[in-house]
Structures are given as C-alpha cells and as structure tokens.
C-alpha cells in the first residue's frame, strides 16, 4: 500500500514539475516589505531610525515560461512570514549607514501523508541574509521651492545562518539562496516644498552560488510631511542569465534559476507619539518569470532619534 502511494506521488511530482516555483531565487520569498532598502532621503548627521516590522505574503499561482499556472507542487500553497530589524544612521549630512536583518518563516500546505512519504517538512525558518549599505549623497541642489538630490549606495548581503538551498523539491519553501551579493544603487529624487516628490533608482547586483546577476529598478511618487508620509511605486528585477525551470540547463538547483518580476505597492507612515511612529503597506507581483504570484502586507513600529 505504502509503495503504491509513493509511486503515485512520484508520478504526480514528475507531472507537476513544470509548475515548480523557484522560490529560493526570489529576494526570498521575502514579503511585501521586501523592497529596495535605499530611498531618496538622508538622515542627517547624528540622526536615524530603527524599525521592527512584521510582514506576510501568500501565493498558490506561479509565473513560469510560457504561462501562468495554478498550484505549488507538493506544498499546494506557500505562505511567508517575516520579522525584520531595519536601521539607518547618519554618519554625516552626506553619508548614511543602512542595516537590515530578516528572520523568515516559510510554510507549505502539504498533507501529512505526502510529508511522511517524501520525508519533507512544511516549514523552513531562520535568519536569512544580513544586508549592510553605505549610502552617499554627492549632489543636492535647491531650486527655491523644490530640490534635486542624487544618491549612490553600495551594499553587501550575506547569509546570517546555516539555512539550506540545495534540498531538491524541499527547497520550494527554502528561505534563501545562500548567495553573497554585492550591490550598487543610484537614486535621483525631485522634491517640492509642499511635500510632493518623485524618485527613480537603478541597481546592479553581483551574486555568488550560481545565482544570476541582476538589474533592479524602481519608480516612486509620494508625499512626505511632518505628520504623514505615503508613496506608491512600481519596481522590477531583470536577471542576467540563469535558466528556466525544466528548460535546457536546468538541473534542479533553484538558486540558478532566472527570476524576473514587476511589482507594484504602497507605503504609509504616521507618527503616533513623539519619536515613535507606525508604518504599513502592501504590494503584489503583477508579472514575472519563475516566481510566485504573491500579494503581501506589512506593518512596522518606527523609532526615530
């Protein structure tokens, strides 16, 4: 009986392999809050903020080549919950330090029978990748009632724990790709004195562990004032190389998969008591390649100093 069930599961997996999501190559299943850590604002010398956020996203559809498909094999659907410590500090009026430390829990929804027969688990969790950036403002010009700021940033992201990304189908719910990545980002922001602003950024990511290098971009419009902040953005990633799932060159190692996506989202922030504020937002992936069709939300407590 057990041999029969196992055989049927193996057949099912082979038939559904076309639908496998390369979760481990996407900024990691990260969540709605997983957006560029670099924006067009500087902290100022001796100033900064620390935030603790909780975010969650879920998907049961994936973007593959050449079509969008329903269902995540083995696990049916995937939910990712993340806690993230984010901090920025102004070393000077032109130089900021940025730090991000995420703890991620990725959960599948496979039946106990499937888990027992494949010796899989519905959960993978742990600290993912710590990120550290140097953010520099080489140019600022005040036009009178508006201003233009140019920013460059250089960052390093590297695994913080011994999580795995090489467990075959189990890695559908892996929390990361175990890649050390060096990034360069350029930002331009135009801001009016009434609080309305628009910014654009472009980034280059050089990765290890057979993860494809990638280009990222983001366009954002918003309003920033002393009592409230809000923005809407569209962001994307384009991988340079990599393989499509089941295409030529794919060997079952998900971090090597080519992952492209376009994401739209919103962010809101409001102070609630002195230097303490709350933030929240949502985002959704509207198109992609080898990635889950995920929608996520986040909330955060922010302390400024």
Image (spheres, helix red, strand yellow):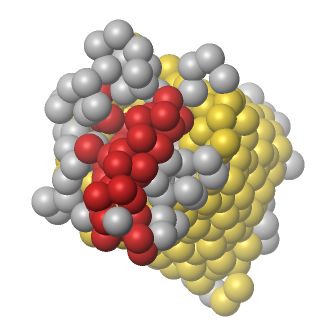
In the foreground, 233 or 113:
113
Q: How many marks?
A: 0
Q: Quadrant of residue 267?
A: bottom right
In the foreground, 175 or 194:
175
Q: Quadrant of residue 79?
A: bottom right
Residue 52 placed where, x, y %? 47, 75
Q: Is residue 44 in sight in this rendering?
A: no
Q: What residue is rendered at 62% in x and 53% in y?
A: 59
Residue 171 placed where, x, y %? 32, 49
Q: What residue is rendered at 17% in x and 32% in y?
A: 209
Residue 280 placed where, x, y %? 68, 68
Q: What residue is rendered at 67% in x and 42% in y?
A: 70
Which residue, as the protein is rendered here, is positioned at the far right? 194
Looking at the picture, does residue 173 appear above or below residue 133? below
Task: Classify the position of the N terminus by image quarter.
Answer: bottom left
In the foreground, 144 or 97:
97
* In the image: residue 21, left or right of residue 262: left
Residue 101 placed where, x, y %? 32, 63
Looking at the picture, does residue 260 appear above or below residue 24? above
Q: Is residue 250 in sight in this rendering?
A: yes
Which residue, as the protein is rendered here, is positioned at the far bottom? 273
* In the image: residue 267, left or right of residue 48: right
* In the image: residue 236, left or right of residue 133: right
In the foreground, 176 or 93:
176
Which residue, as the protein is rendered here, is positioned at the far front? 1
Q: What residue is rendered at 29% in x and 13% in y?
A: 249
């Amino acid at each position: 009986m057990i041999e029969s069930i196992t055989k049927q599961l193996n057949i099912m997996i082979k038939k559904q392999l076309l639908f496998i999501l390369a979760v481990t190559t996407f900024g990691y299943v990260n969540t709605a809050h997983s957006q560029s850590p670099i924006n067009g604002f500087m902290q100022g010398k001796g100033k900064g903020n620390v935030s603790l956020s909780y975010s969650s996203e879920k998907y049961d559809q994936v973007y593959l080549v050449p079509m969008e498909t329903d269902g995540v094999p083995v696990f049916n659907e995937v939910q990712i919950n993340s806690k993230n410590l984010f901090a920025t500090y102004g070393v000077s009026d032109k130089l900021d330090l940025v730090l991000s430390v995420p703890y991620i829990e990725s959960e599948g929804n496979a039946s106990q029978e499937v888990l027992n027969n494949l010796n899989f688990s519905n959960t993978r969790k742990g600290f993912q990748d710590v990120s550290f950036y140097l953010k520099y403002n080489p140019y600022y010009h005040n036009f009178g009632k508006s201003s233009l700021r140019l920013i460059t940033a250089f960052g390093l992201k590297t695994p913080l724990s011994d999580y795995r990304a090489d467990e075959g189908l189990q890695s559908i719910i892996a929390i990361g790709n175990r890649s050390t990545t060096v990034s360069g980002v350029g930002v331009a922001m135009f801001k009016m004195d009434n609080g309305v602003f628009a910014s654009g950024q472009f980034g280059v990511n050089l990765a290890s562990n057979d993860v494809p290098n990638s280009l990222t971009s983001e366009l954002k419009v918003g309003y920033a004032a002393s009592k409230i902040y809000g923005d809407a953005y569209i962001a994307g990633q384009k991988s340079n190389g990599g393989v499509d799932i089941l295409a030529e060159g794919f060997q079952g190692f998900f971090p090597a998969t080519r992952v492209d996506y376009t994401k739209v989202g919103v962010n809101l922030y409001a102070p609630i008591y002195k230097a303490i504020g709350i933030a929240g937002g949502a985002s959704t992936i509207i198109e992609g390649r080898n990635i889950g069709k995920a929608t996520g939300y986040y909330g955060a407590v922010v302390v400024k100093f």
